[in-house]
Amino acid sequence: MTALETPTETAPPAPLPPGYNRALAGYAIIALAAIALVLTVPSGVSKIQLTAGPEAIKIPLLEIPAAIAVGVPVVGAAVVAVLALVQQLRTKQSAPRWMAIVAGALLLLGFLAHLVAGKSGVLPLTGLLTSTLFLATPLIFGALGGVVCERVGIVNIAIEGQLLAGAFAGVLVASVAGQNPYVGLIGAPIAGMGVGALLAWFSIRYRVDQVITGVVLNVLVLGLTTFFFKGLLSDQDGLNDRSRLPALPIPLLSDIPVIGPVLFRQNLLVYLLYAIVILLQLYLFRSRWGLRVRAVGEHPKAADTVGINVNRTRWRNTLLGSAIAGLGGAFFTIGQGLAFGIDITAGSGFIALAALILGRWTPTGAVAAALFFGFANALSQSLRSYGVSLDSNIPLMIPYIVTLFAVAGFGGRVRPPAAEGVPYVK
């Protein structure tokens, strides 16, 4: 080698984008599932109902040959998945997210058509979507409450307790106010805020481990509501009355087929949910308040140096998030027109916590994950009506199995706020 020659160095290969391999596996699973559905499609027709009854525009019952009802959407899902695979392998970049959404939606539609193919059952698509939102509503409230708390570094394991306290206070206040469910909507967030105040007090003032504090609060609220239920609500008439928030259809919008009954024929609690989701998404990522909140959760010392009171911000957000979760607890009683019962939430707070993690600590992500769990629950309750014969315990397991797999890794790697669970000492 002469003096003028210099050795050439091989540049290291560019790192693959985050989630690249996970996306490849996801698209491959969609393509294989689509092929399996096409190969196993039975003969006969798939009956699909698109109207729930009161819509102004009536769509007759669709009776589509199973080969078309199943084949068209799943073949479309396979095509989109294969195109995404090819694009990723060719460009070494993750395919656009819309391709995953379209492929997943088409595969799901084909799967639902496959369930009723050749059977006497009818697929009530509008009813299934309505049940999905109905069952996901408390999960969304709980997950949003967790987002507000954990974005400032407070681990909110106490979502279950906040939901339960909100359910208890909602029906109690509504009963005392003369079966007025709207007054119950005031008591529910206050009860959730009370649980949040205990969480903030022990976590911020005394720097107790936040996970342990949340677990203890869940047990405490369960014990207190059980005690007061047996000693107060069961012995005195008029304190546990069934009162339900009435549906408030929005004119014109509620008459839109499929979408109208699902989104715009709801009660006040669901409409409040819409507003909270939009406001949180905007304020958390498009406002000075959101910037300060995220700064406290990611780097509290840096936030303190620019004049942000870290512990005060944590106190405020914990109370706000707990109030949102408590409001969701009202769904179990006055939202459904039910009286309070022991452990009426049945672990919904922990599924909401899973939705929070799967949604990557964002409002829209938490909503999407909660709707996914709500759909799994709605589908499990409807399998028998589709003519699918299963043991009665299997459908009850589906939402929890889906939750387990989602949190175990199918949601990919997630990173919580850097200062989550770490007390701040100035």
Image (spheres, rainbow, N blue to C red):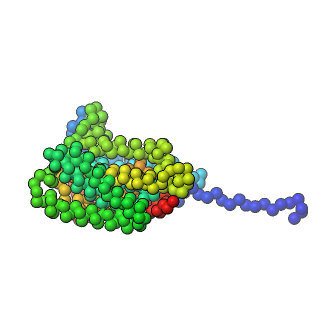
Disc tally is: 0
Say whether residue 108 is visible.
Answer: no
Could you tell whether 278 is left or right of 415 in the image? left
Q: Tell me where residue 265 appears, x and y as whole percent.
A: 26, 40
Could you tell whether 7 is left or right of 376 in the image? right
Q: Nearer the viewer, residue 246 or 421?
A: 421
Give the residue at x 19% y 48%. 174
Q: Tell me where residue 409 appears, x and y as whole percent.
A: 44, 63
Could you tell whether 30 is left or right of 180 in the image? right
Give the residue at x 35% y 49%. 109
Could you tell whether 268 is left or right of 287 in the image? left
Give the residue at x 28% y 32%. 252
Q: Nearer the viewer, residue 373 or 238?
A: 238
The N terminus lies in quadrant: bottom right
Give the residue at x 14% y 51%. 241
Q: Tell me where residue 233 appears, x and y as whole percent.
A: 15, 58
Q: Tell me where residue 423 appears, x and y as whole percent.
A: 46, 62
Say whether residue 54 is visible.
Answer: yes
**Quarter of the view holding residue 311:** bottom left
- In the image, residue 284 sits, relative to residue 3, either above or below, namely above
